[in-house]
Amino acid sequence: MTQHLRNLAGLQPIVGWRVSDKPVAYPEALAFMEARAKAIADGEAGELVWLLEHPPLYTAGTSAKSVDLVAPDRFPVYTAGRGGQYTYHGPEQRVAYVMLDVRRRGGDVRAFVHDLEAWLIDTLAVFDVVGETRSDRVGVWVRRPDRGAGVEDKIAAIGIRLRRWISFHGISLNVAPDLEHFSGIVPCGVSAHGVTSLADLGIRAGMSDVDRALRAAFEQRFGPTKIE
């Protein structure tokens, strides 16, 4: 039985859904995620998806290489503890931190990451954007035939960590960030391709539009949510 069918069968709990309307400092977000993941594992709190924005910053995943931090003094740099390499977070980028019990949801980490990718792809489809994954690159990509044959740009990133089978960290989707801010790093260690956003693709969508699409697509794949 697929995860989606298990959700339809009513075997998954309702997931808390939280949206912050002001930028959240990265250390504050990290401390909250770690505490909430522990509480979920201990049976003291429910699962949660937290949507937010950060001030401009770079984060280093467990596979980050120092050579990929091109401008170390440009923005604050934080060690994230998630999988992956360097990434940028900033205004007009929707970050969704995903604190879910992966064991309860099938215990297959690879399938869980696939579901996160599919969640992003389903969200992009609402805006008539075709998102795709690549076996040799992480994240979600869009083809840019307007810029030449074979040109692809990254529009969304994925990086998670599991502790006692509870996920934290999550995904980021570029709505309308300043794409020049990505030039201070080699995003996720990939230098052969660029970075894009909904705005860069000519999509006029606000953060609230993206939030509605994210929530609807999440519920289709992971089950019902409730505002927390």
Image (tube, rainbow, N blue to C red):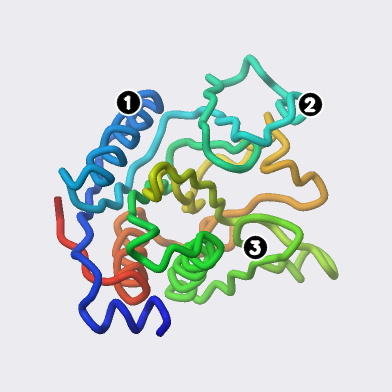
Frontmost of labels 3 and 2 is: 2
Tell me which label, 2 or 1, sits earlier in the chain. Answer: 1
Tell me if residue 22 can be seen. yes
In whole angstroms, how far apart are the C-alphas of marks 1 and 3?
A: 30 Å
Instruction: Evaluate if marks 3 and 2 touch, with contact meaning CB atoms under 8 Å apart.
Output: no
Picture coordinates of residue 166 (x, y %)?
Answer: 37, 48
Determine the residue positioned at 76% across, 46% down. 190
Determine the residue positioned at 52% across, 23% down. 78
Frontmost of labels 1 and 3 is: 1
Instruction: Evaluate if marks 1 and 3 touch, with contact meaning CB atoms under 8 Å apart.
Output: no
For badge 2, the amino acid type reads Val
For badge 3, the amino acid type reads Trp
Q: How many marks?
A: 3
Pick the front one: 140 or 114: 114
Tell me which label, 3 or 2, sits earlier in the chain. Answer: 2
Q: Dot 2 corresponds to which residue?
A: 67
Determine the residue positioned at 51% across, 28% down. 57
Does 78 sit above or below residue 64?
above
Pick the front one: 100 or 174: 100
Q: Secondary structure at mark 2?
A: helix
Picture coordinates of residue 213 (x, y %)?
Answer: 35, 67
Does 44 sit above or below residue 25?
below
Tell me if residue 96 can be seen. no
For badge 1, the amino acid type reads Glu
Q: Quadrant of residue 135?
A: bottom right
Q: Dot 3 corresponds to which residue?
A: 141
Disc 1 residue crowd, few under 14, some 14–19, many 20+, Cα 10 Å: few
Q: Which mark is residue 28?
A: 1
Q: Secondary structure at mark 1?
A: helix
